[in-house]
Amino acid sequence: MDIIHHGAYDGVTGSCHELVVSDQRSVLIDCGLFQGEDNQGRKNSVIDFPLDHVESLFLTHVHIDHVGRIPYLIDAGFKGPIYCSKPTAALLPLMLEDAIRLGITRKQKVIEHLLRTIRSMLKPLPYHQWSDMGRGLKVRFQPAGHVLGSAYLEFDYEDSRVVFSGDLGASHQPLLRQPVSPERADFLVLESTYGDRCHIGREQRIEQLSKILCHTLANAGVTIIPAFSLGRTQELLYELNLILEGLVKVGKCSALDDVDIIVDSPLGNRLTDIYDSMKPFWSEEALDVLALDKQPLMFRGLMEIDSHKDHRQVVEDLKETKRPAVVIAGSGMCSGGRVVNYLKEFLGEPTTDVVFVGYQARGTPGSYIQEGSSWVKLDGRSYTINAQVHSLSGYSAHADQADLIHFVTGIPQKPAEIRLVHGDPPAKAALTEKLVELGYKVS
């Protein structure tokens, strides 16, 4: 078997890998959008590799940098099955509907036709079980702990086993189970997003989140949290609920209940409903919390905004009333979506806090704000940044350096080779150095 990378090899986004089984046969693992600097000089709409021998597509999870090019793949002639986990099959149409509307077309008939086509191609597979793909190729999905439905993939062909990590979850994810290392990997394709750093611990991040809430209350300001609709939004709701309901021991201001918490994300709200309907895939901790709180993703004072009219009204009300509020809105990298309107309105206010809880790809507005720029361009116009900016790395859904090394060293016999993908050069270099020191061959 051989591997060709069509994305996320020299950068982070655009994940797409081709496993060449034989001269006349291959499969794809993911087909995602390029974002930020990774998208410079590229056209997401162009599938620039032949599909003659690609017989199927396997998905590790539904983040757009892993699935966003599927509509273009179909337009280029792909007609094979799309294999994924059961939760991913439920989530994918929602994720792609939003992406299609924003990036391809707003014509509802076209969107519906494309989504029907994608649904007809989906073939959900169970976790932990080998599935026979015919002619000697087998695959097994294993929980990756990154977002609901995420998986790392094991492929067996003849005497070789190739493992694609997809995106691995951090060890302190509260809602999902931590990934377990594979029992064998002759060749490992490993993500390296945070290969150069370690996240803060769970208790620290909850304490930091609580302090930011108190700061919002003290200065009567607006706290803006750009968050991905899938995973990060649900995790934030879960831990905000723990704080507000007193289910964790953190410093809590006496009037914290007066802070409005607003989720302004129609997609995020729909995805939260799916999360809530798939509790069997939750972690043991989250299932234990259910015994104390039947709605751990809901709490008193939470506002969910769906319509665009209500979104505009909330922005205006916050401007006029000066009432303290925490706003969770997409997109996670501030490159579009409703969070942009909040940033335009409040970035110039020193009472505003912007809290980043996820990776910001180079070249995105989120990366400029996070890196301390004095201004940022949003929708073609420059905006001054007077807000206080915070980064809570502990909320990353990605494994950090320690988690990645733990995943590798947990494989009983060392892989013959590890290939690092899905990482900026400094992250890949740092993780390579650590793995080489441990005696692994890294490419």
Image (spheres, helix red, strand yellow):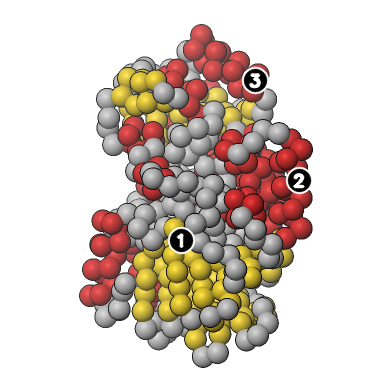
Q: Position of residue 272 (x, y in %)?
A: 65, 44
Residue in front for this viewpoint, 316 or 75: 75
Q: Amino acid at mark 2?
A: His
Q: Amino acid at mark 3?
A: Asp
- Mark drawn on residue 6: 1
Q: Position of residue 355 (x, y in %)?
A: 40, 35
**Residue at image mark 3:** 310
Whole-Å distance between the Cαs marked 1 and 2?
Answer: 27 Å
- Mark drawn on residue 113: 2
Count of marks placed on residues: 3
User: Which residue is found at the position 50% from the left and 22% from the top?
Assistant: 341
Would residue 331 be visible to someone looking at this image? yes
Q: Position of residue 382 (x, y in %)?
A: 35, 21
Q: Quadrant of residue 377?
A: top left
Q: Position of residue 402 (x, y in %)?
A: 34, 64
Residue in front for this viewpoint, 429 or 363: 363
Dot 2: element: helix
65 vs 36, left or right, is right
Whole-Å distance between the Cαs marked 3 and 2?
Answer: 29 Å
Q: Residues within 10 Å of mark 2 (few under 14, many from 20)?
A: few
- Mark drawn on residue 136: none
Q: Amino acid at mark 1?
A: His
Would residue 283 be visible to someone looking at this image? no
Disc 3 vs disc 2: which is toward the camera?
A: 2
The vertical placement of 250 against 396, above or below, is above
Query: If the image is split into quadrants, where does the C terminus sit?
Result: bottom left
Give whichever of discs 1 and 2 has the lower sequence position: 1
Q: Residues within 10 Å of mark 1 (few under 14, many from 20)?
A: many
